[in-house]
Image: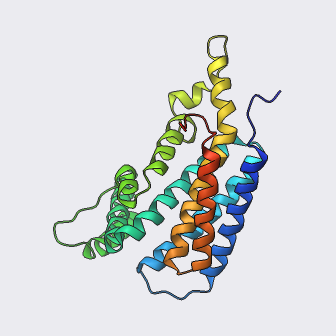
Amino acid sequence: MKNHTDPTPDELALYDKISELGSIVWKKSTGLTVGNFEPRMLSMMLYSRLWSNHKGYTILWKEEQALEADIVLRSAIESAICIAANLRLSDDFVLLMRQDAAFTILGQIKIFRANGDSEMVQKGESVLRNLQSKLPSGIKAAKLDWKLLAERGGVDQLYGFHRMLSGVSSHVTGLSILRGVTNDEMEDGHAELDGIARKMHLMMMAAAMLQGALIHAAVIEAEPEVERAHRLVADMNALSMAWPGVEG
């Protein structure tokens, strides 16, 4: 027997409208020609990932593959956070991407060295030197800080979603694993969490997709879609007044 709460017809209708908007914005993106490492190019790359995540999440959600859907949802939220940060930070966002890329390569080099793979170490070091040559003097490799990135992008709510998913489903954590264990003491708690997730995680995906579509549409100057996105934001704000934890 299902123990979850399904979205209302109005929520499902809103989700479909956001999906339609996402598709239109994607089609408008594909015909653009942009230069390397300019904000529009990065926004297009990030939006491509967000749109792909959105489509994948929708399929998994319909098939009730909750764990797999949540993993994709977390990736979508990261993409939406980056789309917002790219708009607000411009060249500074490019710098953050390069610092993160260098940080990742450093980690890979350590793995190659530990495995005794000297050829891959040399290749990795060559890539690292190229990345470091593009960093300003005194700026070092650094991992992305999702909390700071969301704050600077003005999308703090998305970071809240990101942190929630990281703890309860998307990562292997004590809580995420124990949710699969049932006993008399834990059953009620599991049922409450699972009951909310079916509805609210879909709305998280809707919020991330809508936020990303709105910002990216503005970046590529798709004004009709920007206006349409603002109307959908108003619709979502109205629906959200009935969600758990929202005070009127």
State whether residue 81 is above or below residue 227. Answer: above
Structure colour scheme:
rainbow
Residue farthest toward the left in the current orientation of the protein: 138
One can see residue 169 in this view: yes
Q: Position of residue 240 (x, y in %)?
A: 61, 45
Left or right of 32? Residue 118 is left
Query: Quick one: quadrant of the C terminus?
Result: top right
Residue, x 54% and y 64% (percent of image)?
212
Q: Position of residue 236 (x, y in %)?
A: 62, 53
Q: Position of residue 108 (x, y in %)?
A: 39, 57
Query: Quick one: quadrant of the N terminus?
Result: top right
State whether residue 114 is above or below residue 24. Answer: above
Q: Nearer the viewer, residue 186 or 15?
A: 15
Using the rendered view, name the quadrant where residue 199 is placed: top right
Query: How many labels sit on residues?
Result: 0
Q: Position of residue 115 (x, y in %)?
A: 40, 52
